[in-house]
Amino acid sequence: MGSMSEDQTPTYVDSGSGFNRDMNYIPDRILAGERSADPLDDRFPSGSKDSPREVQRWPAQPGRYRLIAAKACPWANRTIIVRSLLGLDDAISLGLPGPTHDKRSWTFDLDEGGRDPVLGYERLQEAYFARYPDYPRGITVPAIVDVPTKAVVTNDFPQITHDLFFEWRDHHRPDAPDLWPDHLREEMEEVMKRVFTEVNNGVYRCGFAGSQESYDAAYDRLWVALDWLEERLTDRRYLMGDAITEADVRLFTTLARFDPVYHGHFKCNRNKLTEMPALWGYARDLFQTPGFGETIDFDQIKRHYYVVHTDVNPTGIVPQGPELESWHTPHGRERL
Amino acid sequence: MGSMSEDQTPTYVDSGSGFNRDMNYIPDRILAGERSADPLDDRFPSGSKDSPREVQRWPAQPGRYRLIAAKACPWANRTIIVRSLLGLDDAISLGLPGPTHDKRSWTFDLDEGGRDPVLGYERLQEAYFARYPDYPRGITVPAIVDVPTKAVVTNDFPQITHDLFFEWRDHHRPDAPDLWPDHLREEMEEVMKRVFTEVNNGVYRCGFAGSQESYDAAYDRLWVALDWLEERLTDRRYLMGDAITEADVRLFTTLARFDPVYHGHFKCNRNKLTEMPALWGYARDLFQTPGFGETIDFDQIKRHYYVVHTDVNPTGIVPQGPELESWHTPHGRERL
C-alpha cells in the first residue's frame, strides 16, 4: 500500500518490535444497480473492521471513477491486473503515481506537469482531503476516486478487486475469466488468507522487523508458506487448479517483486524465486499471460522500495540486478 | 580489512562519491635468516607505497609471532588459509578476534574473559599503540604481532601471505604446495592484480558507493571481471592451471562471501555465485580442499558485515539466508 502519513519522517522499521500492518481502510463500496450475488459476502455493509464510519454505497457507473494505482506497489498492482483481465479499461480510468513519494503522499510526478490529467492533482493526498479534510491515516494506493467530486471513495484493496468482479459484471468483457468461481470459493478464501498473512504481508514482516528475533520468526514463517506453495503448485497449474483466479493475482504481485526486492532489501534470502521450480514456472506462466506481465515495471518496483525505505536502505542506491530477462523464458506449465 | 579509527562514528559509505581503499599499511617485513629468492620481488625494502617510515626487517623465528586474523574478514582469511596450507600452525600462533568490533577496534570478545590468551589484550588496537602510541590509521586485520614486545609488526596483507611463503620456507610442512610457482609468476601477478582491483575490492566499491553513478560503474566493472573469471575457469581447474596457487586463495575468500553478503548487502546482485557454473564449481572445489573450507565461518562472516556497516544496514539485522549446505555438494572439477 505504501502508506504515508503527514508531518512525519517516514519510518518503516519499528525498532525493537515486529511489523504490524494497519488494516483500517475507507470501507465505502461501489455496487451494481442490482447487486450481483456473492453468496459468501458476509462483510457487507460493515466494511473493514473497526471502521468508525458508516459505509456508503456508490453506484457502479462507467466513466465515473478513476483508479489510482502505482505500478510499484503490489497491492495496487492487483487492481491494475484485475481491471485488465476483466476488460474494465473503458469503464474505469487509471491514474498512475510514480514509484517514489515524498513524506506527504504518492505524487503524479510521471504525468505532464506533475499533475494527474483527469483530477488535476499533484498529490493523491488531495483526493483524500477532498473527502475527509482531517484524514488521519496513511495516503495509500490503490484508491478509487469519484471524478465529479474528485474525492476518494475507497482504498480498501481486497474489497476493490472483489467488487471489480462482482459489482461491475455488466461491464466486463464477454470472455472475462471467472476470478471467483463459486464451487472453489471456500477453499480459495482459505488459500488467499494464508497467502496474505504469510506471503504478501510475510515479506514485509521480514523487511520491517525491528529486532533480530522478530525477523527470524518472520523468516521462518515465510519459508514454511513458500514451501507449501511450491508443493501445491507442483501438480496444479494455478493455485486453484486449471484456471486463473483472484488467488493467483494476489500471489503473483508478490512473486514478481521477490527476486528484485524482497530477496535482498527485505532479507527474504533463503533462496531466489528462480530456485523454486514450481513457483518460478508458475510466476513466469502468469507473467506471460495477457493482463499480468505488461503491468510489471521492474524499474519502478526497485526504485520504490530502495528509495522510499530510507531506514532500511539509507544510501538510496538502487541495485542493478537481478537479471530479469529470464521472466520471458518458456515455463512448460501447459502440461499440468 | 575492516578498518576502524578512533573517536569516529564508523561510516563506510562516502556520500556522493566512490569508494577508495586506504592502502597505506605498516610495511615492516619478517624475513628468513638467509633470504629466500623471489626473483620478482622488487618491492623490498620500500614496503607499501607512500610509507613515511623506514622498513624494518624482523627475523623469521618460529614461536615468536602471533597472527591476528578475524575469520569474518576476507583479507585476514587469506592469511589463515595460507598458514594452514603451508603447515605453519606451530611456527606462528593464531589469535582470532570476533566478527564485530566497536568503533575503536577489533576485539577479542570470543576469548575467555574477552582477552587474547597470549597477548592479554582486549583490543587489537593495543598492539598497534604498543608499536606507535599515536597510530593514526585504521586498526586492521590481518596483523602480525611480535609476542615478546606485544607490538604489531605489520598489517600489510598482500605482503604477509607473500612472506609466509618465501620467508618461512624452512618451517613449511614437507608437502606444502608451491603457491608461487616461478614459471607462472608473471601471469599470476597480472591475474592477482585484476582479481584484487576488480573483484576483491570491486565488491566493496559496489557496497560502499556513495552515489548511484559510482555504484552503477562499480557494478558494471565487477561483472565484467566475474564473467572473465567464469570463462577462465571453464577449462582450468584453478586460476593458474592444475595446481592451487596464491591467486586461488585470494579469489576464494571473496567467493565464499559472495552469496551470503556481497549479493544482498553490497548489491552485487546480477546473479548469485551459485548461478555461475564454473565459478561455483571452483569455489566448492577449494572449499572442500583441506585448508580452505574449515577456515570459513559463515555466521561470523554475515554478522561482521551486517552488524558493523550501520550506514548500509542500520537495523543491524542479519539475514538467515542463503542456504549454504550446497557448499558441500560434489563439484565435478577433478575432470579438468
Image (cartoon, coloured by chain):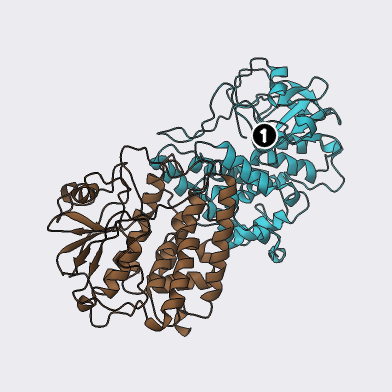
Chain colours: A brown, B cyan
Residue A98 in the image: x percent, y percent? 28, 51
Q: In this view, does B157 lie to the left or right of B207?
A: right
Left or right of A65: which side holds A301? right
Q: Is residue B29 visible?
A: yes
Residue B106, picture quadrant: top right
Indicate the quadrant containing the N terminus of chain B: top left, top right, bottom left or bottom right: top right
Q: Which residue is nearer to you in this view: A36 or B259?
A: A36
Residue furthest top in the image:
B133
Image quadrant containing the C terminus of chain B: bottom right
Can residue B35 be spotted in the picture?
no
Q: Which of A93 and B335 is in front in this view?
A: A93
Percent x, y of residue B128: 69, 22
From this view, report whether residue B85 is shown above or below residue A47.
above
Tell how many labels. 1
A115 and B151: which is toward the camera: A115
User: Mark 1 belongs to which amino acid?
Assistant: Phe
Q: Which residue is drawn at 54% across and 60% down?
A: A222
Element on which disc 1 rests: helix
Residue A236 % position (x, y) = 49, 80
Residue under numbered circle 1: B157
Instruction: Please report, as a chain letter, where disc 1 is located.
Output: B
Measured from the top left, where is residue B184 in percent x and y? 68, 47
Crowd rating for badge 1 (residues with CA inside 10 Å; few <14, some 14–19, many 20+)? many
Q: Quadrant of residue A92?
A: bottom left
Q: Is residue A332 left or right of residue A10?
A: right
- Give the quarter of the image for residue A102: top left
